[in-house]
Image: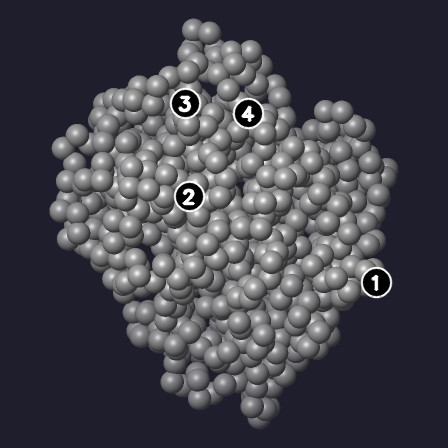
Amino acid sequence: MSEHRPPRYKPYDQPAGGWGSAAATARVLLEQSVVAKGSRALLSMNQPGGFKCPSCAFPDADCHRKLEFCENGVKALAFEATKARVTAEFFARHSVTELMAQSDHWLEMQGRLTEPMRYDAATDHYVPCEWDEAFALIGRHLQALSSPHQAEFYTSGRTPNEAAFLYSIFVREFGTNNFPDCSNMCHEPTSRGLPPVIGVGKGTVVLDDFEHAEAIFIMGQNTGTNSPRMMTNLVEARKRGIPIVAVNPMPERALIRFTDPQDIVQMATLGAADITSEFVHVRIGGDLALLKGMMKVLFERADAGEAVLDQAFLDEHTLGLEAIRDDALAQDWDEIVRVSGISEAQIRRCAEIYIRSKATIICYGMGLTQHQQGSRLVQQVANLLLLRGNFGKPGAGISPIRGHSNVQGDRTVGIDERPSQAYLDRVHEVFGFEPPREDGHHTVESVQAMLAGTAKVFIGLGGNFVRAIPDTERAFAAMRMLDLTVGIATKLNRGHLVHGRDALILPVVARSEWIHTALGEQFVTIEDSMSNVSPSRGVLEPVSTQALPEVEIVCRMAMATLPRSKVDWGAYVHDYDAIRALIAEVYPQIYAGFGEKIRNPKGFHLDIAPRRRVWLTASGKAQFLPLPGLEVNDVVDDPAMLRLATVRSHDQFNTTIYSYNDRYRGVYNDRMILFMNAEDRAERGLAVEARIALETITGDGVQRRVEGLTVLDYPMPRGAVAGYFPELNPLLPLEHYDRNSGTPAAKSIPVRVVAL
């Protein structure tokens, strides 16, 4: 609940965007006291020669719009450019125990970190330390380990390519592939699920494809909150009469009706655009049944003699069609309807939209990936697209809409706990050391190693690891067992307060701030969710002379840890072009000519082979892969069970809480909410706005319970509930995850309601 204001719940019936978005933009700049500074920076955000938005990973429009930002991008910038500061004096006033009692929002509002700090156990305070002292402490702890595999090296998606690449080389020279990162918690099913099917773990769509698509499906993605700039493309598609099918357990306001804040006519006339032509109110976990139903329709009609499949494409480019056909036709319509929650008639309508389209894009978000079979569910999306040849032609393809601004780029340049042997061979050739060959830890495995006592050191290059991961109580206990935790960050967060016996907080230069080294101004590069790599140059003065760029921090950690390193770390502190030259050496197929290409202010597009109908799979063809049955999560035999999906509010980015409001869902000054179908509520004898607890249904003997939730009637499917992340993370068992990708199944947690 808000620290100051009483909760208020009022259904929102206006279009998303519009004047509400404009007002929120102005308000956040005012609240952070950066109206002039922030407004000036916004003119450079996502513009050629400027810096990339520190929020979502959606690409920039290839046009000359003066304003290439959204409401939530403004929030990210305003909170980054804030005038508030967390100084040594702040830490002297507040012990860690006192800070732990504060909310995540309160911690965020304290402002930017300004100097390196070290935890002092005797006083329970963080105290100032010199950078050399901090790096020496890191080096001593890492060198003292009996095995390099006792260290975990986390990476946040805000880390630019140059720092992520050097981090991957440092850690591999140190001797481990333990790279838990934020991709493990969101789109790792894309990275692991798509390569066996199409040969690459990325989307195949570019922004221009939206102008040529004849149908767009959006599955499990809240576009208006998590990638608002995409709404412009959807508005333009609807103006052309293109059908947009939204598949989601929650009807999200922006995908129903939207006013573009940069459309002067719409704003002046209070106009709006209807976005979704077909809303598919799927049950949680029902997406597989929907996809199988659509494929069943296609095969039935093909068997009846209709030319609904692209047979020429299938014959030339694919293998395994018969297994998919047999599986789809074997599914019973009654079961498809029961599991999906969708009528057969609506599934057939969706199939008809797909059949009539000569070029279809399917976008998806974490509503698909965060299930126990998330990787294989993503494969079924690719299967559906393959049936009509929707790869390698304008307006068609698969489009994972990633959340973090460089999470895809980090994976591209080496942040990967399961690297290929070919990549490791290349590292050996370029750098002259033998990298470790065994797989490392993903996020869940890293926490399991902490609990087992085999992990001793955790270094977080950005992010708020402990607040993002599942099983909060066990995660807190795991982190406190470590010998050393290092948080490299712009802002204070919970991860700095749940720490090891030794702990460091190291302040970093933000994306919007400039970087000057001994060789002059430097820039970094960012890869967006559609594989465009662009330069990013900050325009604001750094928060403090004590804050360092990520590249320098990585290099100096390496120098302190590896005194006999084969890598000239000192040189890369100052010369980012030299880092990009190394990236090109390690990845010659996609990054050849990196230094020259990146001089284009708009950047360049990495080659995605399926766009050329080239399949880098074992067979050299796209491979249909079946997923038997209709369920993507374990079946729980409990009549009281509800499926819980954890979601973000509109005033939130990942674990960063901007406010307690979620205006599109009608929630103000509260985050302890459970969105519930009114019939499910009445069936349990609960009053409107009743206070309840949620308990996880598991067989592991661990009680997981969150109390003090207010039930709000919301148009959820029967049997489905939703609540906010990370407040409900304590309900997500560490072992409830996709075994192929390691991604926690946060969109399908079996729970029961307990009246208070």
Q: Nearer the viewer, residue 369 or 77?
A: 77
Q: Label 1, on which residue?
A: 269
Q: Is residue 337 visible?
A: no
Determine the CA span between mark 3 and mark 1: 52 Å
Does dot 2 land on a helix, a strand or a loop?
loop
Q: Is residue 623 above or below residue 6?
A: below
The answer to which of marks 4 and 1 sits earlier in the sequence is 4
The residue shown at (48%, 16%) is: 88
Determine the CA span between mark 4 and mark 1: 42 Å
Mark 1 or 2: in front is 1
Which amino acid type is marked by label 3? Pro
Q: Quadrant of the C terminus?
A: top right
What is the basis of the colouring in this image?
A: one colour
* Rendered image: mark on residue 116: 3
Crowd around label 1: few <14 · some 14–19 · many ≥20 (10 Å)? few
Which amino acid type is marked by label 1? Thr
The answer to which of marks 1 and 2 sits earlier in the sequence is 2
Query: What x and y, as percent, mark residue 284?
Result: 64, 54
Determine the CA span between mark 3 and mark 4: 13 Å
Q: Label 2, on which residue?
A: 159
Mark 2 or 4: in front is 4
* Rendered image: mark on residue 85: 4
